[in-house]
Amino acid sequence: MERTQEYEHVEYGLSEEKQDLKFALAQIDTCVGDLEGNGNKVLDYTRRAAQEGAHVVVFPEMTLTGYPIEDLAFRATFRAAAWDKANALAKQISDEGLGELFVVVGTVGTDHEQDLPRNRMVVLHKAQVWAAYDKHFLPNYGVFDEFRIFSPGQRSVVLNIRGQRIGVTICEDIWQDGGPVQELLSRNIDLLLTINGSPYEEGKGHTRIELAQRRAQEVAAPLLYVNQVGGQDDLIFDGGSFVTSREGQLLHCSPQFVEDVSFWTLPANGTEEHTRLSASKVRPPQLPSDEAAYQACVLGLKDYMSKNHFRGVCLGLSGGIDSALVATMAADACGGENVLGISMPSMFSSDGSKDDAADLAQRIGAQYVVEPIEHLFEAFQQQLHLEGVAAENLQARIRGVIVMAYSNAKGFLALATGNKSELACGYSTIYGDAVGGYAPIKDLLKTRVWQLSRWRNAQAKAVGEREPIPLSSITKAPSAELREGQKDSDSLPDYALLDQVLDAYIEKAHGRADLLADGFDVGTIDTVMNLVDRAEWKRRQYPIGPKVTALAFGRDRRLPITNVFAE
Amino acid sequence: MERTQEYEHVEYGLSEEKQDLKFALAQIDTCVGDLEGNGNKVLDYTRRAAQEGAHVVVFPEMTLTGYPIEDLAFRATFRAAAWDKANALAKQISDEGLGELFVVVGTVGTDHEQDLPRNRMVVLHKAQVWAAYDKHFLPNYGVFDEFRIFSPGQRSVVLNIRGQRIGVTICEDIWQDGGPVQELLSRNIDLLLTINGSPYEEGKGHTRIELAQRRAQEVAAPLLYVNQVGGQDDLIFDGGSFVTSREGQLLHCSPQFVEDVSFWTLPANGTEEHTRLSASKVRPPQLPSDEAAYQACVLGLKDYMSKNHFRGVCLGLSGGIDSALVATMAADACGGENVLGISMPSMFSSDGSKDDAADLAQRIGAQYVVEPIEHLFEAFQQQLHLEGVAAENLQARIRGVIVMAYSNAKGFLALATGNKSELACGYSTIYGDAVGGYAPIKDLLKTRVWQLSRWRNAQAKAVGEREPIPLSSITKAPSAELREGQKDSDSLPDYALLDQVLDAYIEKAHGRADLLADGFDVGTIDTVMNLVDRAEWKRRQYPIGPKVTALAFGRDRRLPITNVFAE
């Protein structure tokens, strides 16, 4: 797949006198594979946009197919169905009398020369697919695998609408130098439009806006950025669509973590004055860090449940902070009455732990059952006579069997409550406490778990509600309670230190020499590296838990989770 | 990452009079991350090559680092350590008086301009790294993720050794048109040398040789192809190195599935006569299909065990064909005495099943224990009162707990016995019979499981040994025995038909319309598509089992399994 530098430039529409052009920024939550559902949502938001007098309505990257579609792109019948859906939708919109609108949606296309999929933008107008643009730069790092899947587009595209010249791009196209943005420099455009599927990553929001501001200045035109919102498998898209002026000032912002349609008008007579007037009112769409991370976790779980048709969840409640935070997030995602907390005390469970579990369930309004495991443990032990770690694991695995029994019997999604620190260090039991179909806090280090727990309690207090998480779950020393007097600190460095080393070793890919240069002591470095390498090795041997990646909300798969790819 | 077409050409060594050039083809089995171990193996094979009077010894792709190294490539300290190892090795070889040899090894390099990893070949000679070439074409399809990891080399390289001009490439470089092979067309080379990490895939062997024959004709020079051998995580490399003449005739072949060093001489005075003489004796290195698949499974398991330091395995023996074949493969991999078979009969287990399990263990010389599960099942049921599928899953999960208890207590690798047909259709219990760290037959459809079982028995008979697999395990109707009278055929289409549909749907990515055109009836298509989609969905929800991919020996991960990446 050698790439050529030969670009073709294509103009759609006719040159005419410039008029005001009203855009609807429709940041919607799509589901991978669900052409029917996604198409209906496009229709719904198009109607709303029409009611507000918009001329152009802009949806996120790969709207019709959902994003990311991974290897589903290789199924020719799915690509054909997506093409049919785009045409049917154009006709349907026209049949409703809205054919004059320009509806910008993402979908999958086919590069017929190579019979390979393309990441495509189409513009629906007057009952047909009026224009098309294919993504040029295909990200293949971190959570992205697009070079694996798509062939790159080689055309730059300008849409002429109401006398305004709109250059178009898809997501990564604006993140790399050269390519379509470079091509559009000489095309005298009035606006750079980009549709995106840009996942939430802590701290990335500012980067995204700063980049857009720089590109707007480069092309000397405002930039309109529409982003997807919602959870898809273990990626979470945060929305936060926006417009910047040609001088790089923020003109408009959509909210984060919710579906939204809002409007912005590209004026007929330049944007200078407009910019100065509105810029002072607009703030970046970034929520404070704790709130954003919490909302991301809740939205991810909520969408995972709805897209996979789960109405409820079940999880073990130990009285510790991890299960308390997960249960609270679950109650926020689907209502406490749809959360089933299972207390599974053993001979090593303290009274405090049992009380805290019951207290938590009561505070969040969860269903609550107690299933003691001591006599089950004894039944196994009469036969197996296990000792040491094998005996500790047995307790955790009996609990795993019970959680899955409730999951099967009630059709609830089982939640794993592991945090990133313990997953990274292998401080959990495979097929035991690691059991679960979704792990809401797998990307949060332990210190972050405490921070978000305190934030959630403070937020409840601020609005006059009862704090959901018992204070003692936050303040007590963490323990797995698999043997008498066991504490996490017997096996792991202090979490404040551990999390710093994990951040350097995992996120920053620092090796041993780098970590020494970072100032960590040699004993801690060797302990943590051994723990993480061994855990990685164990996780590979028993690939059951969430994978620890170098990204805040990373993932490790090839095909989407969905039950709607009937084609 | 825009690619440029600007190639640089580099020549190493001086022009001199042509002499015979003797090559050693060293197809070795490396371990990812194990710079020390891999380096020692290179030294060992270099000594052997020197004893035979070789001038050049050629090792596979990424010899020093192992292959594939996945995201480990991003660790700068690891790349530095690999560079140090290459230099140390060159010095060590020279210190032993072997400095005149040209030792061609693969390793990881760094593109200092972009600070990105490179897939590199280096030639060690006279105590230093004498020459270097970086892979240009980076495969990023199927099991390959190289575009994600490496930046592409932009230099074509010719090595001048004893008057012979050797053009070099790495693996994918010869699979795509253009690139380095194109550049070498005008360089008047005497040999095209390629080092490879080409995984075993059923039927691919011929493709590989045919391609090499075509390339040899294109460049009008013989082609020497050295491939890696051995299992790495869930990829299996089959070796089968070879040489073709400039006319495309096979001149030399190394065996499949074993480490090997063999020799071939590029004569001073053309290869015409040499070709005619030797071609008639040489056969393609492909073993018959059943034998190759069986050997691949055994080698994969054997290397997975040795590279992760397991001496033994444990698995549940049900009396069925899947566990019988897995146990037989395990006995072939590590000796029957290191295999622990666990019979876990319930109230639904037939006498025949129990007898077959014991018979199998006895035939392969395995350790054998019986752990009845009925009273454990009753202990859970007194508390949980499960019905239907939840009660069936409970039996499988109790067995999973027991297998893991033996794994933990004895330090044995737990083996999952699922085949590709049942994994694809979700006909197994998550955290139950799917428990295990390695799944030796996850890539074999059920009909293939029967074929390989019959092949293995026939092979034993042919050499006068007792057939390892009881005939009744092969001939009886498959059953999960989780309720009275249960048969696989209650839930699944006949395996002969099912496997055909699975092949079309999974390997060929045929959609519904394609499957109808294939001639399958609509009822079967809908049943199988629903089963597979639902199983895929379940597997995503509970990501524990091996993933079903569209490749014979596919995989689904980002980092290698290993415990030796200390840098």
Image: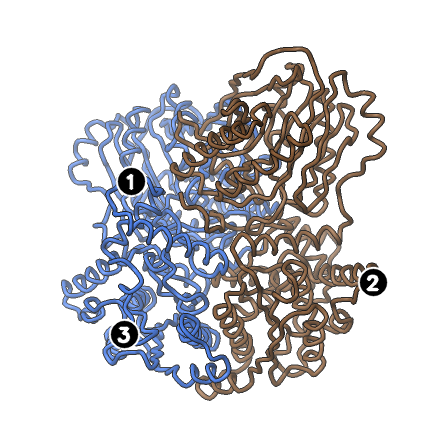
Chain colours: A brown, B blue
User: Nearest the camera: B17 or B285?
Assistant: B285
Residue plotted at (78% across, 24% down):
A247
Q: Residues within 10 Å of mark 3 (few under 14, many from 20)?
A: few
User: Which chain does tag 3 point to?
Assistant: B
Q: CA distance from mark 1 to mark 3?
A: 53 Å
Residue at 53% across, 65% down: A412
Callout 2 crowding tier (Cα within 10 Å): few <14, some 14–19, many ≥20: few
In the depicted structure, whether residue A328 falls above or below residue B205: below
Q: Which residue is mark 1?
A: B242
Tell me if I can see residue A390 in this picture. yes
Q: Mark 3 sits on what residue?
A: B485
Q: Quadrant of the C terminus of chain A?
A: top left
Q: Secondary structure at mark 3?
A: loop
The residue beneath circle 2 is A464
Q: Amino acid at mark 2?
A: Gly
| In contact (CB < 8 Å): disc 1 and disc 3 | no
Front tag of 2 and 3: 2
Disc 2: host chain:
A
The chain identifier of the residue carrying mark 1 reads: B
Asked which secondary structure carries label 2, the reply is: loop
Q: Is residue B511 left or right of residue A73?
A: left
Q: Quadrant of residue A12?
A: top right
Badge 1 element: strand
Percent of width and height locating residue A275: 81, 25
Q: Nearer the viewer, residue A183 or A427?
A: A183
Does residue A261 appear to the left or right of A115 in the view shown?
right
Q: Is residue B525 above or below residue B214?
A: below
